[in-house]
Structure formats: structure tokens, C-alpha cells
Image (spheres, rainbow, N blue to C red):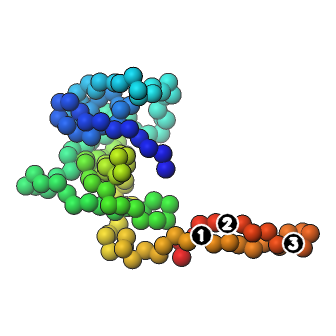
Amino acid sequence: MNSTTVNRCAACAAVVNVHWLTCLVCQAALKHHDSAPTSKLQPLPSLPSLTEVVREPAMKPDGSPLRPVFWEHHRQIIGPGQPEFFFQDSTGQIGLIIRYKEEIVWVAESMLRSRKAFLEQDAVKEMDIIRESPNDQNESITHDFVM
């Protein structure tokens, strides 16, 4: 997993990616630091642009923050992460924008999981698989499996 550098918006204090041009919450222009690499790549056409995403702060009706959440990623339940925003893109997909270990993660609602499922999941274990090779010598291959 690679790490994404984040900052806070000077206007509203929301967590923002250093590569974003504007804040998702208040649409304020973001300052770019020389230490943040700039990308010349265009966004993928299949992804919605930020202007096509409806977003609002992830808070309870009384204004307090939501509890940490868990989600599934590559057959493993990850978390806890702190919800920052709700989102709905132009295709109608809804979910959460989550802060997790100094990264910003977009999680579709279908991938959200319970704390109970997180605590009860089987640990990922490293196992050796023995495979016979054509010259009658066994090869050992190491893989990670969910047990």
C-alpha cells in the first residue's frame, strides 16, 4: 500500500490530498507545496470528475463525528477508519470518503463491514505450497491465504 500525502484546507480545515486543486467541501483553491510532486497524467475517463460528485461532511445530525468504520478490501476487512465525507457520484454510487492511516480512501457503501466482522475474521497466514516439478523435485512456493 502506498502512502498519500494529505494536508488541511486553510478555509475549512477539511482533510485534502496535496494533489487536489480545490477542497471537496468548500471548493476553495488549495495551495500546492514544492515538495508535492505534480502529475501530468489526465484522469481516467471512466472515473467521475470531482464536479460530478455530490459530497457532504460525514457527521451525525447533532454535528458530532461518525464512529470509525470498517470495509472490505481484497477479501480482508480493513479499519478502523474515520469517515470524513459522504459521496454520491454521477452513476448513483454512494459511499464514504475515509481517513485511514494518513491516507484518504473512497469506500463504496457495498464494501462497508461491521466491527464484529472485523474482529471475527480469520488471520492472513503465510503458507508454503508444495508443487511437483517435471524433474521430480518439489518446489516450495510461498503465498498469503486467508484461513
Horizontal side of 8 relative to 62 (left or right) equals right
Residue type for callout 1: Glu
Residue 142: horizontal and vertical position, in percent?
67, 66
Q: Which residue is at 38% across, 34% downward?
A: 49
For residue 26, what is the image quadrant?
A: top left
Q: Which residue is mark 3?
A: 137
Horizontal side of 47 relative to 97 (left or right) equals right
Q: Which residue is mark 1?
A: 126
Residue type for callout 3: Gln
Q: CA distance from mark 2 to mark 1?
A: 7 Å
Q: Which residue is mark 2?
A: 142
Q: Secondary structure at mark 1?
A: strand
Residue 76: horizontal and vertical position, in percent?
46, 65
Residue 141: horizontal and vertical position, in percent?
72, 66
Labels 1 and 3: the sequence-earlier one: 1
Q: CA distance from mark 3 to mark 2?
A: 16 Å
The reply to whether residue 142 is visible in this rendering is: yes
